[in-house]
Image (cartoon, grey):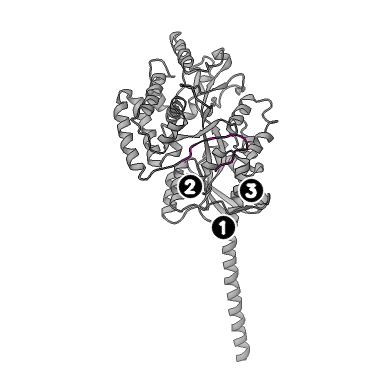
Amino acid sequence: MRHERRTALRLLLVLTLLAASASCLGGSSDRRVLTILTPWTGDVEKDSFQAVLTAFEAKTGITINASPTRALDQVLRTDVQKGEAPDLSVMANPGTLRSYAQQGDLVPLDRFQDKTLGRRLVDQLKSDYGPQWYRLGEAGTSDPYAVVVKASVKSLIWYGPQRLGTQPPDSWAGLVGASQSIVKRGETPWCLAVADPPNSGWPGTDWIEDILLHQSGPDAYTSWVDGKLNWSSPQVSSAWETWGQTVTAPGAVHGDRLTALLTNYGEGAHPLFTALPGCYLEHGALVTADAAAPSKPVPGKDYDFAPFPDLQPMRTPACEVSGDLVSMFRDSPEAEQFMAFPASPQAQQIWPARQLESAFSANRTVTTQMASSYATDSVARRIDELLTSPATLCFDASDSMPSTMAAAFNHAVLDYLNDPTQLPAILTGLDKVQADAYPQPTQSSVCASGSPGQEAQ
């Protein structure tokens, strides 16, 4: 009886150990559930990215839980400091990406293998994307850390062909003259809205960046992003002054410059589509009509774009772009599988197919594959071609700066619109922030040529 009791105890011990082992294995299988932090809280973008995640789950059996937040930078910084970083995170700020890479918080992508294609992920990124986009993922280092999930072009002037009656002039002087003519006939040339909490001001930074790029060129633009060109320099101050002459003159913007401070960016283009136009021109990556409008605007008919004009002759065309980047904070086989997925042509087609006029891929293969979808939408097709063109593409400057510098830039736009006479003091203040934000020299490679066949070095 005692022997049987000992045998039963041993059996119970073995079963307990097996259960513990199964629990540990279960813990390991929990890696089949990944977490990703994302910036998309609006239904359309959130649902489009979820479609990408759903396709990944269907392909791999790995579950990925997204946590959307408007305060992504703050949430991510707090999680990393607590040692509770998500497996993956989307970042719209290459400056933040660079900071995490330099701190050793990110997992480099250079050793991963895309098993579906049978080649290294880095080789896929080099062949399928232009050198500008590959270098962006390197975050100023020698290793790739990110994949571009979605891209956009910012150097665009939007207008209503039927309203304006003609295409905007292809020179800056002509554009200024057209704006002044609209004011003289008692109407308003420009739409402008810069409210977008907690990052209000950024639509104005896009304006200033575009002017600097097309007035002083990519070299000055890059030096500014890298903290080597002061804000009070002639190049940067001239960009601010040029923007001010465009949008702070009486009658220049819908409502007035103070109204622009209070109007949400997403509503900024609404007056472009009203029965009586509230404005005729808008700058930026995307125009949207009021969802309550009786009919949906037709691209090419109700709205179109012209490239941002050069203020000085340029050797090669230049264009400001932006993109959302996904990176890995916690390494696992499942996370590595995910990083290969959004880089693939299969994944890159999902979002543009759902939002044909507002979401684009930087993947060259997808540009070709989407040609039939763009057949009846010349606006989307031309934007898509710009993203993979041989022109010099420069990534959004404020997005590429350290987060403290970018935040100060946003706030400075608000201060300037509130009181343009304070520009000298505003630029001096930005110089002081710059001195603290760049303790070491930065090499961002924020501008690069996209010549076909050219690889990133």
What is the chief secondary structure element of the magenta stretch?
loop
Marks 2 and 3, the one that precedes in the sequence: 3
Mark 2 or mark 1, earlier in chain: 2
Determine contact: label 1, label 3, CB under 8 Å. Answer: no
Residue bearing the label numbered 2: 141
Mark linked to residue 56: 3
Percent of width and height locating residue 126? 60, 43
Closer to the eye: label 2 or 1: 2
Tell whether 351 sits left or right of 197.
right
Q: Residue at x 38, y 17 (%)?
A: 249
Q: Residue shown at 37%/45% (left/top)?
A: 440
Which residue position holds label 1? 332
Image side of residue 195 versus residue 43, left or right: left
Q: Are marks 2 and 1 in contact (CB under 8 Å)?
A: no
In what element is the residue under mark 3?
helix
Q: Give coordinates of residue 308: x percent, y percent.
A: 51, 23
Residue 195: tell me if it is visible: no
Q: Which amino acid type corresponds to the residue marked 3 in the rendered image?
A: Phe
Real-space Cα separation, disc 2 to disc 1, in angstroms: 23 Å
Q: Nearer the viewer, residue 177 or 128?
A: 128
Tell me the magenta residue range.
Answer: 444-457
Kindly indicate whether the residue at mark 3 contacts the one at mark 2 (C-beta within 8 angstroms): no
Extreme residue toward the right, this view: 372
